[in-house]
Structure formats: C-alpha cells, structure tokens
Image: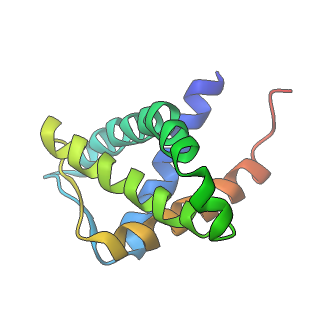
Amino acid sequence: MRLLTRVVVNTVALAVATWLVQGITLTGDTDGQRLAALLLVAAVFGAVNAFVRPIVTFLALPFILLTLGLLLLVINGLMLLLTSWLSGQIGLGFDVDGFWAAVVGAIVVSVVTWLMEILLPSDR
C-alpha cells in the first residue's frame, strides 16, 4: 500500500511540475496515454530516488555541508534529469529541457510531495 501511495504522490507531483515548469514536457496522443506514461515516469523517478540519490548524496556529503545544503537542490535537479533521460530511453515521452528547468522542477516536485504527505493519512 505504501508503494502505491508513493507512486501516486510522485505522479501528482510530476504532473504539477509538468504543468507549471516551462521546460518540462510530457507527450502523448490522448489523456489516457499521458496518464499511463506519467505513472511509469513516477515509478522510474521513485526508483532513481531510491537507488541513485542516496549514493550521490553520500558521495557529495562534504560539499553539501560546505554549501549548507544548497547542493541538495542541484542533486534533486540531476535526479530529475536522470529520470528524463531514462524515460527517453524507454520511450515514455517525458522530457526535461535543461539544468535550470530540472532544478525548478525538482523544487516544485519537492513542495508538492511535502504538501501531499501532510494531507494524506499516514500508515503508521
């Protein structure tokens, strides 16, 4: 149940980022195709955040401390760019156009995820 909730939260957060940030696009012929692609992109994004992000964060820990945590914004943007690249390799039609669009998109995704976790009831 928790995995499904995370995928739904990521889907909504990525949908909001696609809607708000000019450099993030999702292509598809119909709404159903775009929703299916967005669900799969959310799963890819969750996998990237589960497996790649902790390793990058650990390796960059001295620089994160040096920048007082601001490097985490860059890392989150890079994870969104990696998700875009992986989605392009799979053919999902999710594209992030550039570094700054990725950073702004990562901020939007983080804020929406935080708000949804406040609103949704917890399993614990």
The one nearer the camera, 69 or 18, is 69
- Locate residue 32, reporting x and y percent: 27, 43
Task: Write the residue at 80% across / 27% down.
Answer: 123
In this rendering, the count of numbered labels is: 0
Q: Is residue 115 left or right of residue 102?
A: right
The one nearer the camera, 27 or 64, is 64
Q: Is residue 46 visible?
A: yes
- Locate residue 76, reporting x and y percent: 49, 57
Q: Is residue 69 visible?
A: no
Task: Write the residue at 41% across / 51% down.
Answer: 79
Q: Is residue 79 left or right of residue 62?
A: left
- Locate residue 63, reporting x and y percent: 57, 61
- Furthest residue toward top: 1
Q: Is residue 3 left or right of residue 106?
A: right
Q: Is residue 65 above or below residue 20?
A: above
The image quadrant of residue 112 is: bottom right
